[in-house]
Image: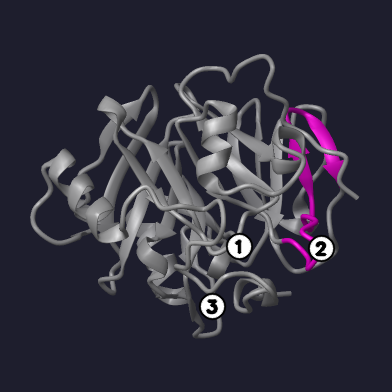
Amino acid sequence: MTDKPSPSTRRPRPGYPRPGAAGPGRTLLRSLAAVAAAALALWGAAAGTTDARAARFAEVGKGVDYALGATRGGVPVHLLRVDPKGAALRVLVGRDLAGEPLTARAYVDRSGALAALNASFFDEKGDPLGLLVADGRTLQGVRKVDWGVFYVDGSGAHVVHSRDFVPAPGVRQAVQTGPRLVVGGVPTPLKPQVAARTALGVTGDGRVVALVSADFAPIGADDLAATLLDLGAVDALNLDGGPSSQLHVRLPGGEVVDQPGGTPVPVAFGIFADPPPREATFGCSCR
């Protein structure tokens, strides 16, 4: 069985704003061009985006680094690098934090995370699809589809095929999406599809790397996989994309990078340099 793209990564959902549109309550902090310029100036990068292999990461918090770079094909992307030894990556659920799906910016504002990016696929009702584990609580079981599972346990972060995931008490966070992009250091053969993307991978030294299209720039599946390999990923997973693709990062000195999406999302990954506030909850009563 081979990994296949999910239709939800390729088809905008009815009634949602077109990619890049600022709908009600989703005011942009600044235009993406200004964000890119500010980020490049902040990190002292050369003019224009930098290939992911040469991207200049800078620390935004303990165990969390950010860079603005580009894929091998020259597509601009936001990059995050997370060291699980110094930072926590948690599953955030909009229904618990606000009773509804949220934007990446709202996830950061409500949870106190340093950064947030979209995660799960979801249906037309806004209900997340597939396995969902938040802070050790299994909220939804594994969906029998040809996807992958990203999960975090006591030994670190992992990406496996859905059929190979074994529920265990030690699993703290988990999300099921797909397709897998890199398996054991080898790119997965995929159909030549192009879309705005969000993806993450696990490197050989146990770090988590994440990539989000800048300004909804479309990325081919092969280019995405190759770029994740350049970032050191030995296993990598495609997350929901298209209008869902979004990222919000708090930079030092009060600056932010805000890559808005075309729609709020029900589940996000939150990245914390320190434990989140006690009053924040990370779970839901999802169906």
Q: Residue at x 65, y 25 (%)?
A: 154
Q: From the viewer's perspective, is 234 left or right of 129?
A: left
Badge 3 or badge 2: first in the primary sequence: 2
Residue 264 in sight from this viewpoint: yes
- Which badge, 2 or 1, comes first in the chain's sequence? 2
Marks 2 and 1, Cα distance to the nearest angstrom?
A: 16 Å
User: Residue 17: where, in percent of width, then height?
Assistant: 57, 70
Tell me if residue 2 is in the magenta stretch: no
Image location of residue 66, percent across then percent down: 32, 41
Please report the residue visible at 39 percent of the width from the left and 44 percent of the height from the top.
80
Quarter of the image that includes the N terminus: bottom right
Residue at image position (63%, 79%) is 11
Label drawn at residue 125:
2
Chosen colour scheme: one colour
| Mark 3 residue crowding within 10 angstroms, few (<14) / some (14–19) / many (20+) | some
Given residues 156 and 99, the one toward you in this image is 99
Q: Are marks 3 and 2 in contact (CB under 8 Å)?
A: no
Magenta stretch in the rendered image: 122-140
Q: Quadrant of residue 215?
A: bottom left
Residue under label 3: 189
Tag nearer the camera, 3 or 2: 2
Determine the secondary structure under disc 1.
loop
Secondary element at tag 3: loop
From the top left corner, tell me how far across and down residue 84 is, in percent. Answer: 50, 28
